[in-house]
Amino acid sequence: MQTWVWVILIVVALIVGIIGTIAIFKLIPGLKNKAADKEAKQILRDAQIKSERIVKNSEIDAKQAAFEAKQNAQNEIRQMKSEILTEQNKLDLREQTIDQRDNALLAKETSLDQKNEALNQRMAACDKKSGELDEKINSILSELEKVSGMSVKEAHDEIMSRVESKMSSEIAAYIKNAEDDARDNAEAKARDLLSLACDKYAQEVTTERTVAVIPLPSDELKGRIIGREGRNIRVLESTLGVDLVIDDTPEVITVSCFDPIRREVARRTLDTLVKDGRIQPGRIEEIAAKMKQQVTVETQKAGEDAAFKLGLPKINRELLGYLGRLKYRTSYGQNALDHSMEVAYLTGIMAAELGLDQNLARRAGLLHDIGKAIDFEQEGSHVQLGAELARKYNEPDVVINSIESHHGDVEATSVIAHLVAAADTLSAARPGARSETMETYVKRIGQLEEIAKGFDGVQQAYAMQAGREVRVMVIPEKVSDAEAVKMAQEMREKIESTMTYPGQIKVSVIREYRAVETAK
């Protein structure tokens, strides 16, 4: 509409201008001549032509604008109709779905009502039958009480007494058969796994020591090591943290220390000083510092070599340093690092047979005794200290649980933890793995026999196979076959609760009845 207004205004302005021009020319006729009249007419014609063109152009522009507006409006209407149609289709589809669900729910509701009604009828029938059965049972019980002359409670007690007596022997026999079957299956599988692991691994064993003996070329060096007024030996003991025993033993000095690392540093320091010959406080401190650094480098290398031999993924460097310190630690004569590697090998082999992660199993086996690297420096058991070290260096949860559970302090939460405990026992208990003093051995054997003889009905007990089996002979008149099974279980439980021993102890209860007659 604004375009038409402007066109009308322009036309009016042109007409007014033309009329004004004509009026001027008519008001001043004296100044006009024919040429002017002719020019005025020409101007008037040009103005009319221009005004007509302007009007036509304006009409064309207006029509074009109106046409475009109409087209845009039609497009918008068409788009809105398409969107409305789409939404309508969606609503129709949703309505159909809702109707289908409604029909399905109605059908289910009808079915449930029918089932509920049938169930109620069955329950009513059951209640009726239950009442009838109660009446019959009461009637029968009354008849039985009259016939037997016993009350229901007395009859119940009598039956239970007979059943208990009968079932006692059956239960013992069942336990024995179940144990035999489980033992046959478990021992067969365990024997295969352990024999396979043992066949694939062998390791040398060292003896346990808390002292180191330093040989001397001559007794003259003892005086030089002691020094003037004991100056050198005081510096040695304070610098190295060990006790030096210099006695009448010819050409020998003994280094005593519970810390194997300090003992090794002291041994190397004294060896170097003896070979060098210059034994004085300054030289002692210099050599001691050098040997400490040397042992630190060697323990780090020992830990890295152990991990490399086992083919383990990256382990924290500091943790490998602690692992390498086990090279100088022994337990019952068994080298701790060799034992850890042996447990790692055995655990990895058994894990492979069971289809488990071998690397994780070997890692758990290698680090299971890592706490022994620091248990002589910090308070706490090697299990607790080892778990703390593993957590500190972000070891997997399976490794931490294997460390905590390999001595039964914490419940094992994975199969690998059980394998580590089994491999640890196997490595420690195999023949030649660990040494034991004669006094401890004799005491353990005697305690084992005394426990067995403490049971009623035992005739004799013998500890066999270096204390790994106890054979118990029982009096056949006092102990039945079922009671022999029960005695073996109780004896096993008492041994487990009262004794400390490496490996396992087999309890064999032997009941033998002999009928002897002499023909004359």
Image: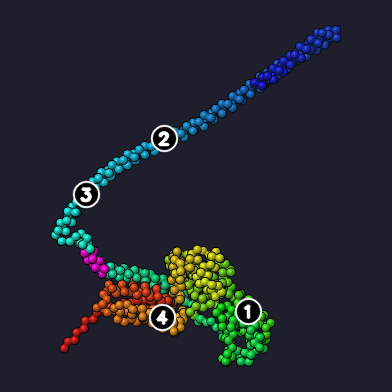
Q: CA distance from mark 3 to mark 4?
A: 68 Å
Point out the frontmost of discs 3 and 2.
3
* Real-space CA distance between mark 2 and mark 4, rounded to the nearest whole angstrom: 85 Å
Amino acid type, label 3: Gly
Q: In percent of the image, x 62 and y 82: which residue is there?
A: 237
Which of the pair 475/361 is nearer the observer? 475
Q: CA distance from mark 3 to mark 2?
A: 52 Å
Q: Which mark lies nearer to you, 2 or 4? A: 4
- Residue 61 in sight: yes
Magenta segment boundaries in residue numbering: 158-169
Q: Nearer the viewer, mark 1 or mark 4?
A: 4
* Image quarter of the N terminus: top right
> For mark 4, does the 10 Å Cα neighbourhood hold few (<14), some (14 to 19), or many (20 or more) residues?
some
**From the viewer's perspective, is the residue at label 3 or at label 1 nearer?**
3
* Majority SS type along the magenta span: helix
Residue 82 in picture, x, y percent from top left:
51, 31
> Which of the two discs, 3 and 2, labels the residue nearer the N terminus?
2
* Disc marking residue 444: 4
Quarter assignment of residue 97: top left
- Residue beneath disc 1: 291
Q: Residue tagged by mark 2?
A: 96
- Mark identifier at residue 49: none
Find residue 123 and report its horizontal and vertical position in percent.
Answer: 26, 46
Instruction: Verify CB contact (< 8 Å) between mark 2 and mark 1.
Output: no
* Amino acid tagged 2: Gln
Disc 1/disc 4 C-alpha distance (Å): 42 Å
The amino acid type, in three-letter code, at marker 4 is Arg
Tell me which numbered mark, 3 or 4, is placed earlier along the sequence: 3
Q: Amino acid at mark 1?
A: Met
Instruction: Reply above or below: 27 against 354.
Output: above
Numbered tag placed on residue 131 in the rendering: 3
